[in-house]
Amino acid sequence: MIGETFDDYVDERGKIRIPGDKTLIDFVDKHSAENGDGLAYRYIDYSRERDGEYQDLTWREFGVRLRAVAARLQQVSDSGDRVAILAPQGLDYVVSIFAAVYAGAIAVPLFDPDEQGHTDRLRTVLEDCSPAVILTVTEAAARVREFFRHLPAARRPRVIAVDAIPEGVGRKWVRPDIAIDDVAYLQYTSGSTRSPAGVEITHRAVGTNLLQMIDAIGVTENSRGVTWLPLFHDMGLLCVILPTIGGGFITIMSPSAFVRRPYRWIKELAAASDGAGTFAAAPNFAFEHAAARGLPKAGEELDLSNVIGLINGSEPVSVTSMRKFNEAFAPYGLPKTAIKPCYGMAEATLFVSATRNSDEAKVVYVDRAELNAGRMVEVDSGADGAIAQVSCGFVAHSQWAAIVDSEHGVEQPDGAVGEIWLHGANMGIGYWGRPAESASTFGNRLARRLPEGSHAEGADIDGIWMRTGDFGAYVDGELFITGRVKDLVIVDGRNHYPQDLEFSAQEADSALRPGFVAAFSVPANELPAEVFDGNSRDRDDTSEQLVVVAERGTGAAKADPGPITEIVRAAIAARHGVTVRDLLLVPAGSIPRTSSGKIARRACRAAYLEGALRGGHRQQAFPDTADDFEPERAAAR
């Protein structure tokens, strides 16, 4: 937004509009021409030096490099071809994303084949999008080629190392004939309930969503961003696309660099001599991790007074984590308004709602029984059955979120729980190669709006809405997320949110690994024989039974499961009034998780029914120690 303000992107109706139908190419070209010497991206490489080695790209250098890669792509692929990025975190990854767009191709941000525990996902995604070209780096090229060795030669995509392309190749680049409503990239969902699907994100959608983020966070022309998030994750990807439209440069580091020493992230957020505001986005676990292990050494100066926004998203926001982070860094000037719980998803490009720039995060306490019955009823924090709900703030400018009775398509009043439906120019246009699923998810219409106080006010009357699959409610104009529609546990006719049951389980006994608990229901006649302990099974009993699968925590690998089971069962019975029919303790790494770290409850349920979990089978190799922990498996949507 060089020489522009947010208002320049708002039309006479108050809606965000991209003037001149600009694509991402136009935004980058503007920076390269008018701010060529300005810093665009900085990558801090901690692989060789403890304090890191800085690698910088100015806008002019960035433009030269991505044109060279784009020109090479144009030599070996056609417009509209998919170009997958299989590279480690770094500046070459950022160049690759934009180079694919500059070539007129569709970028597909993925990850290095060496990424532990995700080989099957990678193969599934690649089969789905059928890329013509793979962009990687010289260091990873051999293993990337090996990854495709099983395919017939004619079906193998061409593998190109972007760091080996001479800059002079860029002189052959030809501006592609693309429009604002063409697909810029495919953002593959994490696949917690099904195989990963590629959300088709257009230039209009990403441009609109970035403007919504800029407005919500309060990003100015000089604001600096800091990210360690995996660049194939939607939150990490949007962080690095953001500078093309607004703000200053983005500092990038690897996920492992943050997890091993979270102070690296904190330090980069600190005030610089230019006084520019800083912002970042991270999943909830990062805030607790930073509070525990990211404090400066005694006597070391740290000034966080310039932090304008820390987006807390991708997984349910914990009141405890926010409190710990605020208490840890308040002595260093961190504003109380810094943490911004938010709501977002790949189908909306990323951003849906967040706490207002000037507000502190809001927490309300509601009655558990009322919530399970579909109503948000506030109570005192100390009341029996009170549970905390963290507000995800206000819905973004030019975006609408309605709470809907999805069976009838009718908008629900404030305080009522229903499915969240979204509308706006930032929505994806569908799932790649899945017309039926695209229509059922993205092509819905509201049958009836509220006559007064409608949250669809201002949206096109005949507009289409995207079903999120999430339950939520409005309280005082703010959006609260209560759970996933498909994950709801219904036992004896009563609704229970799985994350609520999981929290109660892990709080009951420290032998359970926090964050690695899955709750779901199973028909009684499908329970494994071990549950019946020799008793006969009633094959006609289809009543839903509660099952909890929990990974053992550190030091509890050989603990007797009997006492643990009794404690957890008693806690859940007392708090929720439901019996845990089977509590299965499994080794660390057993519970299936998505690429972004969410508990994949439906996959866990399937593995449970297959008997794979009871045999101690490790679904993915998740380490126990933070030093080895890969955050992309802990971040959740």
Image (cartoon, rainbow, N blue to C red):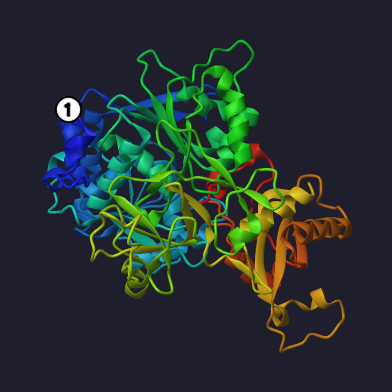
112 on left or right of 587: left
Mark 1 belongs to which amino acid? Gly
The residue nearer to you, when weighing 226 against 474, is 474
Q: Tell me the residue at 65%/74% (across/down).
A: 493
Q: Answer left or right for 466 relative to 637.
A: left
Is 534 located above or below residue 591 in the figure?
below
Looking at the image, is 556 positioned above or below residue 8? below
Task: Give the residue at the far front of this rendering.
Answer: 452
Q: Quadrant of residue 593?
A: bottom right
Instruction: Depth check: give the residue in front, 175 or 482.
Output: 482
Q: Is residue 239 above or below residue 326?
A: below
> Looking at the rendering, which quadrant does residue 178 occupy?
bottom left
| Residue 163 shows up from this direction | no
Residue 83 placement (x, y as % from top left): 30, 55
Q: For mark 1, give the secondary structure.
A: loop
From the viewer's perspective, tell me whether residue 89 is left or right of residue 213. Answer: right
- Which residue is labeled 1 in the image? 3
Q: The N terminus is located in which quarter?
A: top left
Q: Residue 360: in sight, yes or no?
A: yes
Q: Residue furthest bottom?
A: 540
* Classed neighbour count for the residue bearing mark 1: other residues with Cα under 10 Å, few (<14), some (14–19), many (≥20): few
